[in-house]
Image (cartoon, rainbow, N blue to C red):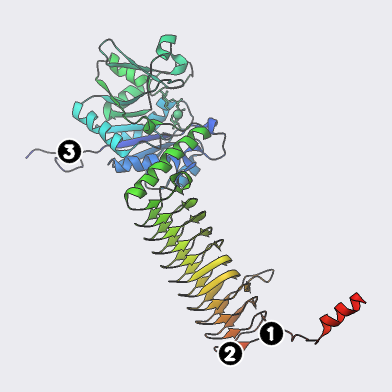
Amino acid sequence: MSHNPSPSPPGAPDHGVAVILAAGRSTRMRSRIPKPLHPLCGLPLTRHVINSCRDAGFARVIVVVGFEAEAVRQGLGADVEYAVQKQPLGTGDAARSAAPHIAGYSGPVAVLAGDVPLLSASTLRALRDQHVASGAALTLLTAILDDATGYGRIVRDAEGRVAMIVEEKDATDSERLIREWNPSIYCFDGHAMLAGLKRLRSDNAQRELYLTDVVGLMVRDGARVDALRVSDADETLGVNSRVDLAQVTGILRRRVLTGLMLEGVTVVDAASTYVDATVKVGADTVLEPGAILLGSTTIGEECQIGPNTRIRDSRIGDRCTIAYSQITESKLASGVRVGPFAHLRPGTEVDQGARIGDFVELKNTRLGAGASASHLAYLGDSDIGAGANIGAGAVTCNYDGARKHRTQIGDGAFVGSNATLVAPVVVGGGAYVAAGSTITADVPADALAIARSHAAIKEGWAARRRRDQEA
Ligand code: UD1
Ligand code: CA
């Protein structure tokens, strides 16, 4: 048997290493937020690139950070390796910063910009597979645009082979007419890449080390450089400004909705429905116009969400209907009805079959199974039992001006309209609180609490007054 020095078992495919360049200053975003962290459909921009690399099977992902390096690391997560570029001296210098991570590695090394979030795993896989099969030193992804202004152009020789990449600022007039451009997505042979990077010089219009110059250097040395033309040009869109960010967001949003529809979700009006790439929605759920589902939200099956409803970081069970409402960091069991015009704030938990009607606000509150708060109530820092009924205008006074206190309402309790429960306070199971009462002491189970002044009835008073006024 022959000796195999590689760490992977004999015959196992080497899926390679991916290097993502994300150290630039991104001045064109005009933002305090570093570009890799700008949110795009629920994930930081560069996280989309990382996920595509992972989905394409790259075992190691190295992100080159520089500008706001610590924030970018925090924002992108600890499941990738980081290399630091000390100064933004160009894409070639950024790639050099990752060199220690790939020293001695001879498998395929993909190098990508961190601002190309729509690149699919399948395109990345196709690029790597072609590269490995051909044995080229470098395989480039290229794309065709009618107007490639601003981008590096692919210069080919008389036989149509890639000769070099020329940057817009260094290009001649005739080179500027080339429509084939460089989206900055490459697959290198590891050794050839490191050798090429060592030879870069900054004798160009921007006084930078261009990663793109490696192409010409390799070709002049007789190494094989191939290209793969991408079929869907959207995949190569880079985000340099907020205008680009909006365009990319629109495309990704459509993709997410299409994916949901193919999984059995009805989207009544895709143009007004916004769902983050991180959200899960069950089959036969209907998303009405104006449904906005964000963050780590999960929606069950057969729900009706919307119209005009925004749900963030929440879990919604099956068969819930939620209309014209806002829900944040909350958990709803199955068969819950919410809205119209309800506000469920963080820490709300609603059990099966409960009902939350119009102008009801809940915060850090548990509403038991089958309980109902149908209109005009504020329930904060409360535990409300199963089957309890909360009348219109009921309010838990949870804040004394300095501290928050809890209200407990037992199973099957009835809280009348406009009752005011001054926390901390307990209303026992099955108890009644009379309408209009202000409750400042605990109410035992099955008791009636009534705290309101008696009405004085003056017979005939109104009629007498009218007579006096007429006289
Ligand atoms: C680069 C390419 C250009 C290509 C274009 C596609 C070069 C020289 N040019 O130009 O051919 O058409 O992308 O969008 O490569 N970065 C660093 N450190 C640096 C500079 C950049 O990490 O010192 C990172 C950036 O964060 C970004 C990526 O590299 O993610 C590309 O940099 P950018 O400045 O956008 O390059 P372009 O000028 O657009
Ligand atoms: Ca760019």
Residue holding disc 3: 5
Q: Amino acid at mark 3?
A: Pro
Q: Amino acid at mark 2?
A: Ala
Residue 219 shown left or right of residue 324 in the figure: left
Q: Is residue 304 above or below residue 203?
A: below
Residue holding disc 2: 447
Q: Do we see residue 199 in this rendering?
A: no
Badge 1 marks a residue whose secondary structure is loop
Q: Residues within 10 Å of mark 1 (few under 14, many from 20)?
A: some
Can you say which quadrant of the picture contains the C terminus? Answer: bottom right
Furthest residue in direction right, as rendered:
471
Q: Give how far apart the Cα atoms at labels 2 and 3 are.
A: 81 Å
Q: Quadrant of residue 221?
A: top left
Q: Is residue 179 above or below residue 453?
A: above
Q: Amino acid at mark 1?
A: Ala
Badge 2 marks a residue whose secondary structure is loop
Can you say which quadrant of the picture contains the N terminus? Answer: top left
Q: Residues within 10 Å of mark 3 (few under 14, many from 20)?
A: few
- 220 or 356, nearer to the observer: 356
Q: If the picture is divided into quarters, which one holds ligand 1?
A: top left
- 219 or 358, nearer to the observer: 358
Which residue lies at the image location 46% right of the left edge and 59% below the top edge?
A: 314
Q: Give how far apart the Cα atoms at labels 2 and 1 are.
A: 13 Å
Q: Do we see residue 116 in this rendering?
A: yes
